[in-house]
Amino acid sequence: MRKIRQSRKLQNVRYDVRGPILVEAQRLEAEGHHILKLNIGNTAPFGFEAPEAIVADMVHHLP
């Protein structure tokens, strides 16, 4: 089986759902701060919507 190597362009990319950022977010939340957890990939529950022009273009290009 061929080994897949990570691109050099991605060497400094981090997905920090765990680690120091999470620890700090939990600390702030425990202090009563409201933390938006945007890492779920669905921003609609937070009121972020795609512009209508983008949605229309996507629909137009569906097979």
Image (tube, rainbow, N blue to C red):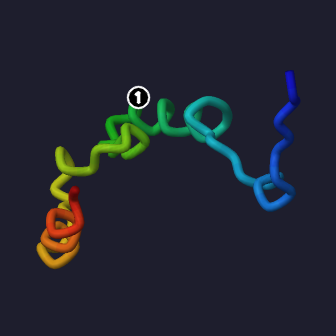
Q: Residue furthest front?
A: 63
Q: Quadrant of residue 4?
A: top right
Q: Is residue 38 above or below residue 40?
A: below
Crowding around mark 1 (Cα neighbors within 10 Å: few <14, some 14 to 19, many 20+) is few
Q: Position of residue 32 (x, y in %)?
A: 32, 36
The residue depicted at 56 percent of the width and 34 percent of the height is 17
Please state the total of marks drawn on the protein image: 1
Q: Amino acid at mark 1?
A: Ala
> Does residue 22 appear left or right of residue 32 in this picture?
right
The residue depicted at 62 percent of the width and 40 percent of the height is 16
Q: Quadrant of the C terminus?
A: bottom left
Give 1 or 21, whichever is nearer the viewer.
1
Q: Secondary structure at mark 1?
A: helix
Q: Position of residue 40 (x, y in %)?
A: 37, 37
The residue depicted at 67 percent of the width and 37 percent of the height is 20
Q: Quadrant of residue 59?
A: bottom left
User: What residue would you read off at disc 1?
Assistant: 30
Q: Quadrant of the N terminus?
A: top right
Give 44 or 55, whichever is nearer the viewer.
55
Q: Position of residue 27 (x, y in %)?
A: 50, 32
Give 3 or 63, whichever is nearer the viewer.
63
Q: Is residue 61 above or below residue 33?
A: below
The residue depicted at 23 percent of the width and 67 percent of the height is 61
Q: Quadrant of residue 54?
A: bottom left
Q: Residue furthest top?
A: 1
Q: Position of residue 43 (x, y in %)?
A: 27, 50
